[in-house]
Amino acid sequence: MTTTHTAKAHILGFPRIGAERELKFALEKFWRDEISEAELVKVGQTLRRRHWAWQSEADLDWVSVGDFAWYDQILNTAALLGCLPERFGFDPKRLSLSQYFALARGNAEQPALEMTKYFDTNYHYLVPELSSESTFDGGVEWFFHEIEDAQTQGHAVKAVLPGPLTFLWLAKAKDGYNKLDLLPKVLARYTAIIEKLSAKGVRLLQLDEPILALELPLEWQAAFAPTYQELAGKGTQILLATYFDSVESHAQLLADLPVAGVHLDLVRAPAQLAAFTAIWPKNKVLSLGVIDGRNIWASDLNKVLAAIAEPAKALGGYLWLAPSCSLLHSPVDLAQETQLDAELKSWLAFAKQKLAELSVLKKAINGSDVADVLALNAFSQAARRASTRIHNPAVAERLANLPPQFDQRHAPFAERQTAQQQRFHLPLLPTTTIGSFPQTSQIRAARAAFKQGKLSAADYELAMQAEIALAVQKQDALGIDVLVHGEAERNDMVEYFGEQLAGFAFTQLAWVQSYGSRCVKPPILFGDVSRPQAMTVAWSTYAQSLTDKPMKGMLTGPVTILQWSFVRDDQPRALTCQQIALAIRDEVQDLEAAGIGMIQIDEPAFREGLPLKKSQWASYLAWAGQAFRVSASGVGNATQIHTHMCYSEFNDILPEIAAMDADVITIETSRSDMKLLEAFGSFQYPNEIGPGVYDIHSPRVASVNEMLRLIAKALEVVPAERLWINPDCGLKTRGWPETEAALNNMLLATQQARAAI
Ligand code: GLN
Ligand code: ZN
């Protein structure tokens, strides 16, 4: 660490996918054998060098190296440590790129490593598989090669790795083995890595320990001091990075650790700063994460400067400035968005623009004259606060004058159930599907032609109607009881609604890596939400006109729309969610008025909105559950509200799921062999349930007997009067032949199950 008294700037990591998703396209070409390994390697190097150059141009004090990964940084770390699952039989020291991708994607003999969400982000990492036998004898040298490459480019390097405790926490241990027992072996490898970094002249290593933001078991908390004791003093100094929530309760622990400094997320948890400045030792770095690494808004630079003015004085040269977390969770470059208007653009900053913000903050703190930039920033922040594009008085007024009981159905479930039975006369064990039918290349081609102006709106509508008619005809022929229109007209379940709601904007290239080569492009929810006109009624009524069976209307729920968008940072998420809920409520009421008697409001992202700390779950569940009820409660007793949630374990939130009071909930249960359903049984979940009886993630057609067995298991838990039969999730990723075969088996299994009751 240098001793000059100037604040420094750095980032925790940069998105690797490329502004034009270069890495994605290169990876996919490599997997299809269309480019050589050398060509792929070149793309990776070009991206890394470009991103380092940007960091250096923004006058950051180091470039971050180690944030790049061919597929996932946690898998890279496992490959670096040498702890690969035995079952693949790979030698970690000689791991080829193709073998690395086999770990990530599976091969003919072995399924891939499991994938799961990285904390509360939409990024998915590969879960290292560890056992008591695991070894950490070292593996690939990619990390060191990247460091050498950055050094040859003339950069000062800060190396970046997941911290040892976070790495272990994220791994899964076979047979309930205590992962902490592996810590000594892991630390021996980290020590060797640090010694090697030190020999290469790398003075600084950032170790990410975001698990400190969780409610960590005491045993894990206690492991921090000895761990960092062991890693300290090896030549390369350590910056311990925390993010995604407050680590205030560990302030003393962190102050006492023998590390050069600690990074705090002051965007998610600004209040924690005081607890740190009060006790922070002299000569220890505090890296303040003041720029939002997970959202797309330009920072209010003057506000940031005001908030850190005092600590800046106290810390002097030990103040570092940074984004809150790795910029992995931001899109890359706003400059590419040629179709956003200038006003909206002036409110935004993507990863590259965040580097520039960092540079301004650093200059301001260090006394350079950036008055012009700060004035311009103040101007655009004020313009955003006052903009009539954002603030719609009608929305505020509606929220202030909600009718009594706006979040409650008119009658309790039992009464509604009777009314609905009288209306629909469904057989025992009614059959349905989750909403989407195969999105064929024909459908996608029609949509692309429409978007490029090659197909008129009228012809596009005709093409989609033909697809809907096909889906209805196939469902009728199969004999399904409750039909869906198939969602042919939808590109994406959030984008489709965002495009029609006021308050949303869409980008061309604001992609964020979700996993591997997959990216998502969330809409930008920038203003008060309202629904100018009906969004789905025409499609649903057209579909209903083709059949005598009930047609389910199909909507995306408020929590899922919120969760899968970049949302505004100028009001609480709960309020934004309630605005969306009212817009969906309008659509629900319009569907009802148009004669659609069953309406499904999908909430697949309900669970992923849960805060990292359990102590904060109750408040989230209260507002998220209420938002769902607001969207669903404007209808009469004989209108049946469905909801669908996937990938969900509900054991710990069943009372809140029940409180959402959907008449029917469909969930994914086939892959857990109906295990996930057991909790519903012991909790005595009161309303109707459709546990998925076959897995839709694979083209394999489950047999009648397999489904019959799952139905029988479900009947042990849920009385027949409240059980529905359906697949696990939507069928959009499947082809028609396997879809029809599987649904046919599902109906045969249902017939047999009904006969046996
Ligand atoms: N209705 C949607 C579909 O079937 C639900 C998708 C989801 O839950 N992710 O595609
Ligand atoms: Zn689903």
Image (cartoon, helix red, strand yellow):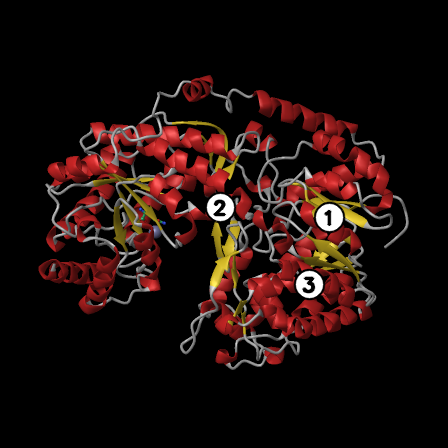
User: From the viewer's perspective, is residue 421 above or below residue 238?
Assistant: above
Q: Nearer the viewer, residue 410 or 739?
A: 410
Residue assigned mark 2: 610
Of badges 3 and 2, nearer the viewer stands 3
Q: Nearer the viewer, residue 10 or 221?
A: 221
Residue at 58% in and 62% down: 169
Q: Mark 1 vs mark 2: which is more N-terminal?
A: 1
Whether label 3 lies within 8 Å of ligand 2 gets the answer no
Badge 2 element = loop
At label 3, which amino acid type do we have? Ala
Dot 1 surroundings within 10 Å: few (below 14), some, or many (20 or more)?
some
Q: Which mark is residue 24?
A: none
At label 2, which amino acid type do we have? Leu
Q: Mark 3 vs mark 1: which is more N-terminal?
A: 3
User: From the viewer's perspective, is residue 341 above or below residue 702?
Assistant: above
Of badges 1 and 2, nearer the viewer stands 1
Residue at 60% in and 58% down: 217
Where in the figure is residue 25, as x and y percent of width and height?
50, 59
Res. 92 image quadrant: bottom right
Quadrant of the drawing holding the C terminus: bottom left
Residue assigned mark 3: 223
User: Gap between marks 3 and 1, in whole Å?
Assistant: 15 Å
Residue 659 in sight from this viewpoint: yes
Residue 52 falls left or right of residue 571: right
Dot 3 surroundings within 10 Å: few (below 14), some, or many (20 or more)?
few
